Image: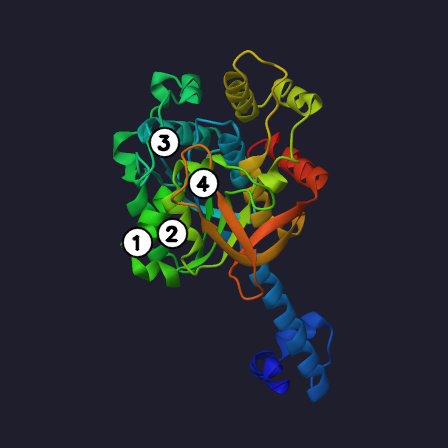
Amino acid sequence: MRLRQFERPRVGVRLLAGLVTMWGSPFQAAAGFRPGAGRLQTRLLAGLVLAAFLAAAAERPLPVFLDTDIGDDIDDALALALALESPELKVLGISTVLQDGARRADLVWRILQLYGRTDIPVGSGAERPLVAPPRTGPVRQVEALRPRDAMPADRRRNGVELLIATCLHSTEKVTLVAYGPLTNIALALRSEPRLHDRIERIVLMNGVFFRPGLEYNTKMDPEASAIVYSSGLPVTAVGLDVTMQCELTADHLRRFAQSPLENVQFLWKLIQIWQGGNASQRPILHDPLAVAVTVKPDLVSTIAGTVSVELKGTLEQTYGMTVFRKSATGVVRVAQEVSSAAAVEFFMQRVVAAPR
């Protein structure tokens, strides 16, 4: 069995060795090998070519689909900016979730304009949770939009349908990064069983696992969260246990305020709307941490297990609580610790920069 672990790489080396032998001198001359130098040099060259091939494959951007309730807390817009500024990610599509989806999509569209990424399709998803009471109140950050910032009618899509189509038509498995209530993800999983073979994993900002309490994304649609956690798909969840440690400082906010860049100034405008006149209120990077962990998993330490969601509890007390049970065979990994300073610095370096 130990030999079989190396069978595929050895086959790859043999194949490349054959190609090097067949193509011969151009490769050998480029690498500084003498023609006819022998089998050992050919195999060494094949190993170098294979290493270069594997390195190139490792550098391919990860295909991701983002699901967001942008427009409520400021962290959704900051997470979108971080995803767009991360060359390690290939954003295939974005869906909005819950209440006033069209205006949330307009906000996504405006940010895509600022980052020169209007090639990314955007869809408005579910307006209401599966069972829980609907969200009420204004989506305040759309106040930053002008009439001309509205998304063109011919670009509007159904968010759940967009999510499904994106995953099914992608040439590679897709990673879902969901940092809102999980209504869209749950509806998609229930609607299209083939998604299980087309999703690499799901990265969530969701839950609180190591102390009692409720987390907003979970409690807004507990049934949807339960569907996702029990789907059998690999899930990585960053919850309040770690995200609460990633708060921006006044100095960080000053960098937003003083930036001459249009994209950063728009984010600063959204921050000010979210602050509502309370300048001492500072963003906590709940949703950006989910994006950051997708790029740099080592920012958090995780533990494997299962997550169940309380569906029979009292509203605003226990309904929507997440219960984590450690298990070596569990496919859910929840973040237990975070390198908060590194996470915040990673975020700041990318988000206060010019569009890439």
| Tags 3 and 4 touching, CB below 8 Å | no
The kind of residue tagged 4 is Thr
The kind of residue tagged 3 is Ala
Q: Which residue is mark 3?
A: 105
- Sort mark 1 into few (<14), some (14-19) or many (20+) by Cα contacts within 10 Å: some
Say what secondary structure mark 2 lies in: helix
User: Residue 292: horizontal and vertical position, in percent?
Assistant: 59, 44
Query: On screen, 176 above or below 320?
Result: below
Which tag, 4 or 2, sits closer to the chain's start?
A: 4
| Tags 4 and 2 touching, CB below 8 Å | no
Query: Which mark is on residue 190?
Result: 1
The kind of residue tagged 1 is Arg
Kindly report the distance in space between the C-alpha atoms of the residues bearing marks 4 and 2: 11 Å
Say what secondary structure mark 4 lies in: helix
Q: Which residue is mark 2?
A: 227
In this rendering, position of residue 31 left or right of residue 149? right
The kind of residue tagged 2 is Ile
User: Residue 153: horizontal and vertical position, in percent?
Assistant: 26, 30
* Residue at the extreme top: 277
What residue do we see at 56% from left, 82% from top? 15
Which tag, 3 or 4, sits closer to the chain's start?
A: 3
